[in-house]
Image (spheres, rainbow, N blue to C red):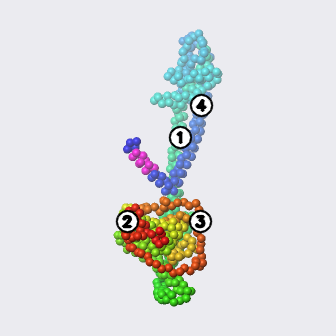
Amino acid sequence: MSAWGRLGRVRAGRRLRGVTRWWRSSLQVRVLVSTLGIGLVALALLGAYVGDRISSGLFEARLQQVLGESARSTRQAQDFFSSATATTRADVQQLLQDVTAAQRGGGSGEREVFVLRAPGQQSTVEVGATATDRTLVDLVSRELKEATAGGGQQWQSVSVPDEDGRPQPGIVVGQDVTVPVVGTYQMFFLYSLEAEQQRLDFLLSTLALAAAALVLLLGAMTWSVTRRTVHPVQQAAQVAERLADGHLSERMTVRGDDEMARLARSFNEMAEGLQDQIRRMEELSTLQRRFVSDVSHELRTPLTTIRMAGEVIHASRDDFDPAVKRSAELLQTQLDRFEDLLADLLEISRFDAGAAVLDAERRDVRDVVVQAVDHATTLAQRRGSFLSVRLGDEPATADVDPRRVERVLRNLLVNAVEHADGSTVEVTVGADARAVAVTVRDHGVGMTAQEAAHVFDRFWRADPARARTTGGTGLGLAISLEDAHLHGGRLEAWGRPGRGACFRLTLPRRAGIVLDGSPLPLVPEEAPERAEAAPLPRTDPAALPELPAMTGEIAVVADLRDPTRTDVVTDAGRAGSTAAGGAP
């Protein structure tokens, strides 16, 4: 196909799509086109029926008239032949010509007359046929001659050429006559139906004009009715869109007392109810945020006092009996958790109030990952998990707030270690021209797709009966999601029961970039299917035995990529695996 042909196809496709969109987007156009289409079909069928009836009526009336005139003319000619005294060939020839000429104008209009020898007729006197127009004799067919020879009056429809050579409808009527001396001849009358055809054309053109006027009237009526019906609906749709955009004071115009007016009033009442409800919810939300913020601030002072007293008691716990010593340790643990909860509540209140500010700077996200992994190493050692870190060879620089990104990664790592049940936790860094991504993958208990959809909800837990041994507040992932959104990025979760879970943080390299993908996949490619995942036992925290205090030393190195570090396993160049406690 040539370039012009392809260009034509593209333009035709665009026009077709434009017409399709126009058809789908306008109710008024669909109603108008449908009504006009049905009206045109109905008028076409009615016109065809009326035209056929008129044509048949005109033809039948003219046919009966022609047959009557032909019968009378044939009788007159027969009487003339019977009374004639012609005995010679010349006299008979003259007789035939006189009768033919006389009968041409004997009807209601001009007609052509042919007197022809009957088929199979033999005579001792040869007399030729006569005709008023010999060029039209061929219109008398052999079938009509044979039918006429059988007796009675016979007729046949023919096409008669006019002066310009255009065909016009006509009728040929024939009947036998007896001519003196020469025997049986056949007399044919040719009638033109041009006048009837003109009358029929006039009637059909009049019907067509009336149908066109009726279609225009029907279209105008349909347009007016649909406009009066669809316009309030369009106005309601526009007002609803404005309401959805936050313009809660938008209302419909009410005119009259008909159904549309009642619709407008009901819509306005609904909008007022929604506005009032939303205003109440906003006020309640504001009060709730202010309450959380005020309570969090007010609790700081008594918490500080309680912490000071608790630290004094905790420092002297060795002098107490075992029960009091255990109570001092639990008090210190819960105070730490209470302080973390207050900090998280204050952070959430900042996000809700829109007061969170991003302190962005150009940083290599790999360095932030290293700091977060170092922070989670202690917890991984206690839980017997193995941290595997793949940083990549290329720099993963982006405009980020290091404090917030590190907090997100710490939350993801703590969450992964807590649910890994001693399995490996994999941290992967990837980057492309538009974004930087970090995935945290564990191979622990996992979660369902429904749980993954709620994992970022505040205070939500997949298993309420599961012990929170690390002291989480239930707000970490919610805060992490807000931090990701503050960067213009995304935080996503995937999980399957018995196959672990994967969290992916995707951040744009620069402010203003709209993310349409991620450098790293969310669903792990190597996640194997398990035939059946055994249900995990639910342990009552109150039934746990008292554990002896543990002491030890942990070597901390600031850079995971330091070649002198003994707990880093090199993997494909600069990629490394950080071994936590309990790992070989």
Residue reaching furthest to the left: 362
Q: CA distance from mark 2 to mark 4?
A: 99 Å
Residue reaching furthest to the right: 151
Measured from the top left, where is residue 216 in percent x and y?
A: 50, 50
Give the mark nearer the N terminus: 3 vs 4. Answer: 4
Q: Nearer the viewer, mark 1 or mark 3?
A: 3
Magenta segment's dominant SS is helix
In the picture, measured across the screen, residue 311 lies left or right of residue 61, that is left
| Mark 3 and mark 2 residues within 8 Å of each other at the beta carbon | no
Task: Locate the N terminus by quadrant.
Answer: top left
| Mark 4 and mark 1 residues within 8 Å of each other at the beta carbon | no
Residue 15 counted in the magenta span? yes
Q: CA distance from mark 3 to mark 4?
A: 98 Å
Q: Please tell me in which quadrant of the rendered image residue 408 appears.
A: bottom left
Q: Secondary structure at mark 3?
A: loop
Give the mark nearer the N terminus: 2 vs 4. Answer: 4
Q: Secondary structure at mark 1?
A: helix
The span shown in magenta is: 6-16
Name which residue lies at 50% across and 21% down: 134
Q: Nearer the viewer, mark 3 or mark 4?
A: 3
Name which residue lies at 57% across and 10% down: 125
Q: Which residue is mark 1?
A: 204
| Mark 2 and mark 1 residues within 8 Å of each other at the beta carbon | no
Name which residue lies at 51% across and 48% down: 213
Give the mark nearer the N terminus: 1 vs 3. Answer: 1
Name which residue lies at 43% across and 71% down: 373
Q: Which residue is mark 2?
A: 396
The tag on residue 534 is 3
Give the mark nearer the N terminus: 4 vs 1. Answer: 4
